[in-house]
Image (tube, rainbow, N blue to C red):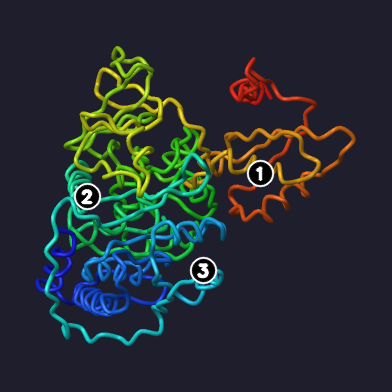
Amino acid sequence: MLFEPMFAHASRMPNEVAIIDDRGQYTFQQLAAMSAGLGMYLRAQTSQPRVGLLLPASAGFVASFYGTLLAGKAVVPINFLLGEREVAHVIADSGIDTVVTIPLLAGRLKETPIKIVDLTALPQVPPGAIQPKLPEVKADDTAVVMYTSGTSGLPKGVVLSYGNLHSDVQAAIDHAQLEGKHRFLGIIPLFHSTGLLATMLAPVTLGSMTVYTGRFSPVATIKAIREHKISVIAAVPSMYGAVARLKDAGPADMVSLYAALSGGEPLPANVREGFLAKFGKPIYEGYGLTETIGPVTFNSPQRNKPGSVGTPVPGVTVRITDDDGKDVAQGQSGEVWLKGPMIMKGYFNLPAETAAVMTADGFFKTGDLGMVDPEGFVHITGRKKELIIVAGEKAVPREIEEALMMHPAVAEAAVLGKKDVSRGEVVMAFIVLKEGQQATPEELKETCRAQGLAAFKVPRELVFVAELPHSPTGKVLKRVLAEQLKEG
């Protein structure tokens, strides 16, 4: 269901380039052989039903992903930007005992009892030397367990089936009218659902070439687009903003571009308009979640309304509801509910959390606020949840507040997101110190780092206040803080 297209391309056009990455280029025949060889190895390596991948965007990730599926295992992509505590949680919670990685990232696993498969040390498989027997899978079989931030601050596993992945990649291809002739650029890590779907599953399904860069660089992005005649890119808004700020770049660099797709965080108007003004190319904003494996609505070259997140992809039903779960009038804001074949099976080993977001008739309650306009375009107006999105990465306020409270001088802490031109949002903290105690912003940041928080979760700004606004029941009124933040 997912791996058949790769082997079909390897048979039909074996010498066509499938992937170019920081280490070289690989044909479809080579990619299929690498995947098949890894599948045989991983089948013998572990008896566990899941295998972890701690890898940059590369041919190695793609081969390891498909190799894991060929081994009859589910893939657990691990976000290498997470702190050590979070990585350890993902490993323990998912029950994996084997992780495929490279020496550059293997150090992230030093405190975990895990078997490490060094991708760079495995023997090369001659192209065409292996003709695997493809495993028989059903649509409801688990293909991926992808971890996303939970309400407790620790990541929670989103269980995605073969049917989830297959349906959304086909819907996205149809929605944007993508074709095999298109060339993709992968600059979002493949542990992200957007990167996985838009820059791996889609091009492999189509038989398209993909160029991967292990680390994002605006200069390298422009160079790749120009040299490889890239036609489809997927990125978070902050990446587009960085590219648009390049002095020595212009429309000539983007002549091959068919679609610049944006997701992961809201697309600021100044980034959208600045990119269009500089390059003469629109950015097509979309909306999706880890729980949907990719975009469920997005703008496309065929139908685009700037400021919206587009129209639903085929097979998706969108409801906008009030607090009682009743549909609101068209044009009014409410919680976004989604239904379709790409909606997750549930949260891994978290039945109560799954039940809290899934309705009896199959709708997923996103926790995001939005509205649908008369033309059918979806607009996201806010977040019911308190997640802060920093350049596409999710930060949970409660986790950061708990870390700040570990400093002996802190009496109270309240964390929220502050809009930022380059990163979408940054983490901001309001701090109340204990009477007679002192602390500097740098000391508090160091406390967060000592608690194992990832760099993007460490507050960019800290404001010391005499007191925080509270409700009669003692709850911190973050909406009041947000209003004060807007007022400067």
Q: Is residue 167 above or below residue 465?
A: below
The numbered mark at residue 295 is none
Dividing the image into 4 quarters, which one contains the C terminus? top right
Nearer to us in this view, 45 or 369: 45
Pick whichever, 205 or 54, lies toward us: 54
User: Is mark 1 in CB contact (under 8 Å) with mark 3?
Assistant: no
- Find disc 2 in the rendering and name its residue: 169
What whole-number distance in Å separates the C-alpha atoms at marks 2 and 3? 34 Å
Secondary structure of the residue carrying numbered label 2 = helix
| Amino acid type, callout 1 | Pro
Q: Position of residue 250 (x, y in %)?
A: 45, 50
Q: Quadrant of the N terminus?
A: bottom left
Which amino acid, by three-letter code, is at mark 3?
Answer: Thr
Snapshot quadrant of residue 401: top right
| Number of numbered markers | 3
Question: Which image quadrant is residue 189 in?
Answer: bottom left
Above or below residue 475? Residue 133 is below
Ranked by sequence position, the earlier of labels 2 and 1 is 2
Front label number (2 vs 3): 3
- Residue at 18%, 47% (x, y): give it: 167
Residue 334 in percent (x, y) is at 37, 20
- Label located before the other in sequence (1 or 3): 3
Q: Is residue 55 left or right of residue 177?
A: right
Q: Amino acid at mark 2?
A: Val
- Disc on res. 112: 3
